[in-house]
Image (cartoon, grey):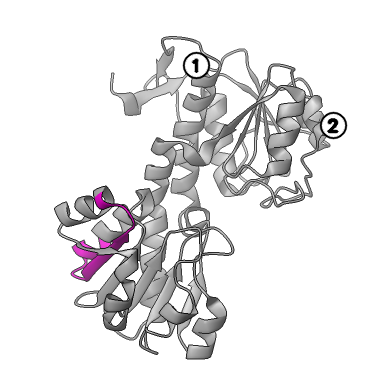
Amino acid sequence: MKEADRVADLSGLSICVLGGDRREAELISGLIDSGARVSCFGTPTDGLRSEAAVAPSARDACSGANAVILPLSGTDSSGNVKITSKPVSITRELLAAADPAAIVLSGVVRPCLAADCAALGVRLVDTGEDDELAILNSIPSAEGAILMAMQATPFTIHNSNCLVLGPGRTGLTLARMLQALGAHVWGAARKAPGRARLFEMGIAPVDFADLAHCLPQMDIVFNTVPSLVLDRSLVYLLKRTAVIIDLASAPGGVDFIAAAERGIHAELAPGLPGKVAPLTAGRILARVIPRIIEDEFGKGERKVRSLDEEHRPGR
């Protein structure tokens, strides 16, 4: 049996899903297919499986749960879930309603969430650090970034000069897609191994220390680095006709004020998978999150069931 044809065995587990969008509806389907009992709050009910219990409150949804799942965007600095159809605030009291041996999964881990989980002795899983999830999500992220660039430019991607800042999981996928479209692609990496990988892919490697030498040639700059890498001095080296697409989480890695002063089109575009391809992004969650939960509960050798034996929604 191929790995893609397997689902985790979560039978006997009670799982709470707080907040989310269309992606979480697909995730809930995957959890149910894995044998879990699912309760949710703040998740859109449109397209939700009938087997999922829609709780009257976040506390009711969390009550006795073995796992509490937050959206990939996590919470803001105050603990409020960012993507939700109803207000959800993650507090120590709320998490205390879950099973004492519960795990909490979030794509962004804020200090307040980490502190609450530590105080309760709850295991906290940063799903944003999962390689499988990040690599699969890089596909809709890269497609969305290219779509935004196409919409913002009067010229083709083909034969344009494109710079990708950061050769991480999303950056490499994006660089490869741009290359396939016929763009001239540069990639900026701080470390030699990253630049070596770019060179191996046929992408012109650039050290961040040398950005000033290549920026004046660029038509489109894509940033994936979640810290300020295009400051005012570097932004002013770009052509006024250049376009910047920043995929990093807010506040991004670009001086947007300088870009506006320069008359450069610059957009901050975090969370693209859920915006441009929510169905695919949801299926990615449904594939990966149950496996993470199963692994966290340490069931040893994974118990699996063939999807040939039961229907996965949307397939």
Toward the top, the furthest residue is 300
Residue underneath mark 2:
93
Q: Position of residue 154 (x, y in %)?
A: 33, 86
Is residue 165 shown left or right of residue 8?
left
Is residue 206 shown left or right of residue 273?
left
Identified at 66% across, 51% down, the residue is 83
Residue underneath mark 1:
9
Q: What stretch is highlighted in magenta?
A: 177-192
Which image quadrant: the C terminus?
top left
Label 2 secondary element:
helix
Q: Where is residue 86 in the image (x, y as percent from the top left)?
A: 77, 49
Identified at 50% across, 58% down, the residue is 226
- The answer to if 84 sits in the magenta stretch is no
Is residue 2 shown left or right of residue 170?
left
Query: Residue flagged by tag 2: what amino acid is it?
Result: Glu
- The answer to if 182 sits in the magenta stretch is yes
